[in-house]
Image (tube, rainbow, N blue to C red):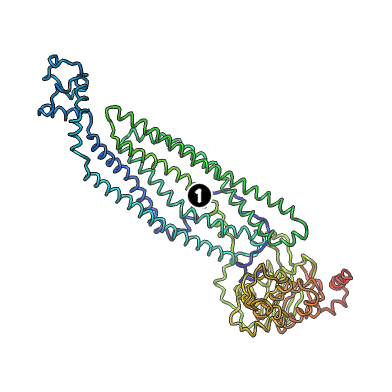
Amino acid sequence: MPDSNRTAARPMRGGPMGGGEKAKDTRGALGKLISYCRNQAGIILFALILAAAGAVFTIIGPDQISKLTDYIYDGLSGGITTEELAADVQNQVASGEINILDYLPEGTNPEDVDLSSIDLTDTDSELTQAILNNITLSEEYQSSLENEGIDMDGILHVVFILVAIYAASAIFSFLQHYIMQTVTQRTSRRLRGDIDTKINRLPLKYFSGNASGDVLSRMTNDIDMIGQAMSNSLSNLVTAIAQFIGCLIMMYYTNAIMATTTVLATLIGIAVMIIIMSRSQKYFTARQRSLGTLNGYIEEMYTGHDVIRILNAEDEVKGKFSEMNKAVKTANFRSQFLSGLMQPLMTFIGNLGYVAVCVVGAALIIDDNRITFGVITAFLIYTRLFEQPLRQISQAMTQVQSCAAASERVFEFLAEDEMEDESAKTQRIENVRGEVEFKNVKFAYPNTPEKEIIHNFNVKVKPGQKVAIVGPTGAGKTTMVNLLMRFFEPTGGEILIDGVPTKNIPRSNVHSQFGMVLQDTWLFEGTVRENLIYNTENVTDEQMEAACKACGIHSFIKALPHGYDSVLSDNTAISAGQKQLMTIARAMIQNSPMLILDEATSSVDTKTEMLTQQAMDKLTDKRTSFVIAHRLSTIKNADIILVMRDGDIVEQGNHEELIKKNGFYAELYNSQFDRAS
């Protein structure tokens, strides 16, 4: 029976452990995530535009690098084609700068050559080719080319353009990463806030059917996975797609043959990627589900570690853990192995593309200089830029699949049925006297509506009375308190506080009327003072110390290194009985008009029980209190004892009256002393 204000802080235990068994709906899960982020759609779209713009500037670069290569090559080699070279030599011959007779092939008789018929641009003539080669290889001609020099102005112009292009690309990339990180943090914070809010709106039946470790896994592991996908995968995916399309356009614009060569080499990679991704999705779903199951089991086993050791159940626990861990290992190995195949495959295909570009480019140069060296340089870069997006897409898709699996689990939780919306309920109870009435109350748990637990329960409690609820396990004692606190709603009848039906009062108002001391003590890591005055305002030191003295723990607290400011943690030497006494003191400090005590003295020894009983008497004085007790000696002074069996009150009265009846209560009471003897 968790207090409503503590639900988020104290995880409930028990129930099946799992992260959802239904088939993976990738499109639906991602659609919900996109819809969830629609309030940030504008800034996300702007970031994606920046990512695409950065990719565009990146793919423009190789075209300028091609020009830069040609400038350098032209400066070093003259930078002219065979036809241009022949025409240039022909002009120099015509102007008299070059004498053909000086460059005739060795062994050629000048008298046998008709100089007027020689056309140096006729590259089909062997004589012409020989003369042309001799001229272009001569020192004089090479000297004339070197005098022209490298076009430094042209090179500097291209360099400035390249600097501007890559600077713009870097700025756009930085901005989009900054924006996406900001959006991711906001979304993660909002998701965690929504889950935290959702926890306090869920009915108790959810926590009795789901492990708290699985809920924590949704809030931590799954949201972290969503954040990673949003901050990295989304922008990388857009960048990769823009770069892929841009490279394709630029390559075909530069040279269709070289572009086709590059595309054919990478099509193999695309086909392999599609095949692998289609087969790996189920393993990502299994990984997230099995991880949630394992987290839930670990949380439960750590909580019950002492019990496990007492019962010598370590081997059984280790066996179950090994099975669950094996499921996580198998799903993780398969998903990561299949996705990990992509990078080496894409590397191989990328290297294959380099080879293809070099071979085809060399062939095109040999084939009458159909392309320049700058084009080959550009395509070597384009091959890398064209293959790189495929890697990024494969990696992004891997994360997107994990994101889809995590999103489904998170939105499954957020879509769970909540308790009734009570915003329209304005009726509140103030200055409560403590009159409580159960009128014809019936109850069956929602998951088993056919099995009624409480049958036509009727009782009226006067203000200030101490009511003990006793009975064997499963009689319905705790269920009655859950109904009183509105953790569950009756399936029939009604419960009234000071004559007002609790169904007409907001739950928070009902909860504020009760202080609770549970058998399962709850202390968090913090100072003693923080634990004692938890969620209670305006508590003075005198009030706090008075409550602790009444419970007999003041001396113990003062003996701690820093007294009431000592920090409680797992390493603090504090017994279960002392923890119980601290929770009783906390209830006294809360000073609520009504109390619920669920086996509050079960963890203390006989001497401490006497002190605790005295403290309880002070605590319950002039307060309506409901005490669930198995140790019947602790409720002998109760005003009313309700004896329950199979969901019905079979006896009712004080201790003396019930003993005289010699009925079921007397049988329970006497059986405890028989066991003790």
Residue 55 vs residue 279, the one in the foreground: 55
Identity of the residue furthest to the left in this view: 95
- Relative to 418, say whether 130 is above or below: above
- Relative to 286, say whether 259 is above or below: above
Which quarter shows the N terminus?
Answer: bottom right
Can you give x and y, in whole percent of width and height, for residue 437 in the image?
70, 77
Can you give x and y, in whole percent of width and height, for residue 222 in the image?
55, 56
Which residue in the protein does label 1 denote? 399
Q: What is the crowding at mark 1: few (fewer than 14 residues within 10 Å), some, or many (at least 20)?
A: many
Can you give x and y, in whole percent of width and height, for residue 316 in the image?
74, 53
The kind of secondary structure element at disc 1 is helix
Residue 330, picture quadrant: top right
Can you give x and y, in whole percent of width and height, for residue 399 in the image?
50, 49
Identify the residue at horizontal 33%, vertical 50% (top origin): 166
Q: How many marks?
A: 1
Identity of the residue furthest to the top in this view: 112
Identify the residue at horizontal 35%, vertical 47% (top origin): 58
- Relative to 214, say whether 505 is above or below: below
Residue 562, picture quadrant: bottom right
Identify the residue at horizontal 62%, vertical 57% (top origin): 214
Q: Is residue 410 left or right of residue 484?
A: left
Residue 500 in view here: no
- Relative to 432, say whether 16 is above or below: above
Which quarter shows the C terminus?
Answer: bottom right
Identify the residue at horizontal 58%, vertical 43% (top origin): 334
Residue 202 vs residue 542, the one in the foreground: 542
**Amino acid marked by disc 1:** Gln
Residue 190 in view here: yes
